[in-house]
Image (cartoon, helix red, strand yellow):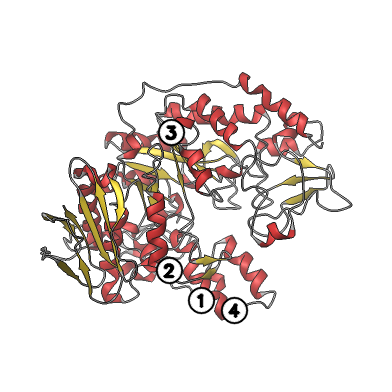
């Protein structure tokens, strides 16, 4: 049935009937502000049963490793039951662990082990859509008058075509015709991921009950996938040609986004104990502040993508990275002018290429040094740092040589569109995809030099990067000069310097050049972070009035301070107490 604006608002009025729940008493401080997070992509982290797929058995085996690294919290990426049309981001049962990853008992054992080591856990929640195999959707499509029909967005076609000209993120129409009822359903992503109707209070009640289920188990928060897309337009309309050309989407920002998030927070996080961090695609600065300002009680924080998309055009074409873009983003993301906003800082996750391949040196002799320098930066910025599995050992992009090697649905879609449409040559597309594909982040974790890099004794679900023979945990864990050891030292340094967590941020770089330097200012003491983003020696002049006292940490051995200027080796980075 076609749901009118009036009907949608009437459904929304049922929010008062939603079940509320609270957690334990609020802590004295907001724990996530001082935490260092580590993201696990379950399928590729550690296989514990030899079937070639990572699982909770394997994750539990590696908890001590993460405790040794020094992380305080783990974000477990999509792990619920799913037919895997989009690598788990198409959920068929929110209360069941994906069988590939084990059982609920395996999850409980993993969670118990993390708690014993003082590590918190947050889970991915995909609440914009479900799988088309979820029981709600299968009931929804059975008939127009089924109770679950309004759990999703169903509409009649217009003049023999889709209801609107809306496009999905992965290409093609955002509408799919269901022949059983002869109506279209809406999907922001693939047609295997039908969008939930958040205007229906029964939908919200179900989602809130899911959060309570996992919170009661002891989970400490949630990362909300595609959360800015949940509030769909209350009335149908066509996007203009200008909107389409500018890449705007019907899902960028719905009228009732804030109302939905406040309602979720009021019912599920009234004491703010849980960490609610959202994936904030399409949010400009004003919207980001509105979503994450503490006194608005919507999200605890958000993942911004402004910088991450600067060097990727059209979802596949690689553009040059610019230090000026990085500096500008970090200055804005500090949110010193918005004390109620606590940012997230990150360089890698399961959707983007490896940071050392993307932002570090392309020269082998400087690769490890540049990986350490990136650690200096991410762990000395204001905000909660998120590390991604393998980042702590400097894992690099996979050397793809054929489209057949890609697992990423986006890679195959753009190949079909661009190469199949004769817009781009196969060689050009392959060169770009090798630098931009999500698969770079999804190759198995490199533990040692044994078969499959120690990830699995079986046949790995995905290609293992051939550089695992030199880049692996076993080779680095006892090496005082390794990337791993430096990450450990940098995490310790962050935890002993209040300025690196809570201090104000001030860029003191020159307007051009390869040196990036910034101050962190705090009553307990100030710091100065200095980094050389180049393959050549650079000179940094210590700002007037700044008195260095000692080097807190540096990625070059035996570093000392010589005033009034410092000579920095290629990809050298350090933090100085001032």
Q: Up-down: is 332 above or below 539?
A: above
On-image quarter of the N terminus: top right
Q: Is residue 294 left or right of residue 167?
A: left
Mark pair 4, 3: CA separation? 48 Å
Residue 294: which numbered mark, if any? 3
Do tag 1 and tag 2 residues touch (Cβ < 8 Å)? no
Residue at which label 1 appears: 431
Res. 47 visible in picture: no
Mark pair 3, 2: CA separation? 33 Å
Q: Which residue occupies the foreground of this view, 217 or 335?
A: 335
Residue at which label 2 appears: 321
Q: Up-down: is 501 above or below 469?
A: above
Q: Earlier in the sequence, mark 4 or mark 3?
A: 3
Residue at which label 4 appears: 426
Q: Earlier in the sequence, mark 4 or mark 1?
A: 4
Q: Position of residue 136 (x, y in %)?
A: 68, 35
- Mark nearer the viewer, 4 or 3: 3
Mark 1 Cα shell of 10 Å, populated few (<14), some (14-19), many (≥20): some
Q: Which residue occupies the foreground of this view, 194 or 528?
A: 528
Mark 2 Cα shell of 10 Å, populated few (<14), some (14-19), many (≥20): some
Q: Position of residue 274 (x, y in %)?
A: 42, 31
Q: Residue furthest front?
A: 544
Q: Please tell me in which quadrant of the rendered image residue 511 appears.
A: bottom left
Q: Secondary structure at mark 2?
A: loop
Mark pair 4, 2: CA separation? 23 Å
Q: Position of residue 332 (x, y in %)?
A: 41, 52
Q: Earlier in the sequence, mark 3 or mark 2?
A: 3
């Amino acid at each position: 049935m076609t749901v009118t604006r009036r009907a949608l608002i009437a459904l929304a009025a049922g929010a008062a009937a939603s079940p509320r729940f609270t957690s334990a008493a609020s802590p004295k401080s907001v724990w996530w502000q001082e935490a260092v997070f580590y993201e696990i992509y379950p399928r590729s982290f550690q296989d514990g049963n030899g079937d070639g797929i990572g699982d909770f058995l394997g994750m539990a085996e590696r908890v001590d490793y993460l405790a040794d690294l020094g992380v305080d919290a783990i974000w477990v990426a999509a792990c619920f039951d799913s037919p895997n049309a989009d690598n788990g981001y198409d959920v068929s049962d929110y209360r069941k662990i994906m069988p590939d990853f084990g059982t609920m008992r395996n999850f409980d054992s993993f969670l118990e082990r993390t708690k014993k080591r003082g590590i918190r856990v947050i889970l991915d929640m995909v609440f914009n859509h479900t799988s088309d195999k979820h029981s709600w959707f299968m009931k929804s499509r059975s008939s127009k008058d089924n109770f679950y029909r309004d759990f999703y967005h169903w509409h009649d076609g217009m003049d023999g075509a889709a209801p609107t000209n809306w496009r999905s993120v992965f290409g093609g129409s955002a509408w799919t015709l269901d022949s059983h009822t002869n109506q279209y359903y809406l999907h922001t992503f693939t047609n295997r991921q039908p969008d939930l109707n958040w205007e229906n209070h029964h939908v919200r009640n179900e989602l809130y009950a899911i959060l309570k289920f996992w919170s009661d188990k002891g989970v400490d928060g949630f990362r909300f996938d595609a959360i800015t897309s949940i509030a769909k337009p209350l009335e149908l309309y066509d996007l203009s040609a200008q909107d389409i050309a500018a890449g705007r989407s019907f899902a960028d920002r719905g009228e009732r986004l804030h109302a939905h998030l406040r309602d979720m927070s009021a019912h599920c996080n009234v004491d703010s104990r849980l960490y609610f961090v959202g994936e904030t695609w399409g949010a400009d600065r004003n919207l980001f502040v509105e979503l994450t300002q503490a006194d608005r009680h919507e999200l605890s924080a958000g993942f911004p993508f402004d910088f991450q998309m600067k060097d990727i055009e059209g979802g596949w074409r690689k553009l040059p990275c610019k230090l000026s873009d990085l500096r500008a983003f970090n200055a804005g993301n500090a949110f010193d002018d918005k004390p109620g906003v606590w940012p997230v800082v990150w360089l890698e996750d399961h959707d983007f290429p490896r940071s050392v391949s993307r932002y570090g040196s392309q020269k082998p002799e400087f690769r490890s040094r540049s990986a350490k320098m990136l650690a200096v930066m991410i762990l000395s910025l204001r905000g909660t740092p998120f590390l991604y599995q393998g980042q702590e050992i400097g894992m690099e992009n996979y050397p793809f040589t054929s489209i057949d090697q890609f697992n990423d649905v986006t890679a195959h879609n753009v190949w079909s569109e661009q190469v199949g449409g004769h817009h781009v040559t196969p060689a050009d597309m392959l060169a770009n995809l090798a630098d931009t594909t999500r698969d770079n982040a999804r190759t198995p974790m490199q533990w040692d030099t044994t078969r499959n890099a120690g990830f699995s004794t079986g046949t790995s679900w995905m290609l293992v990067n051939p550089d695992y023979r030199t880049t692996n945990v076993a080779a680095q864990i006892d090496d005082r000069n390794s990337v791993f050891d430096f990450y450990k030292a940098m995490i310790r340094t962050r935890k002993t310097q209040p300025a690196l967590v809570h201090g104000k941020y001030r860029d003191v770089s020159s307007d051009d050049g390869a040196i990036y330097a910034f101050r962190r200012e705090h009553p307990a003491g100030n710091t100065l972070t200095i980094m050389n983003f180049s393959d050549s020696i650079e000179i940094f002049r210590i700002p007037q009035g700044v008195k260095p006292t000692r080097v807190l940490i540096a990625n070059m051995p035996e570093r000392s301070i010589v005033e009034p200027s410092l000579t920095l080796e290629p990809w050298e980075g350090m933090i100085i107490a001032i």
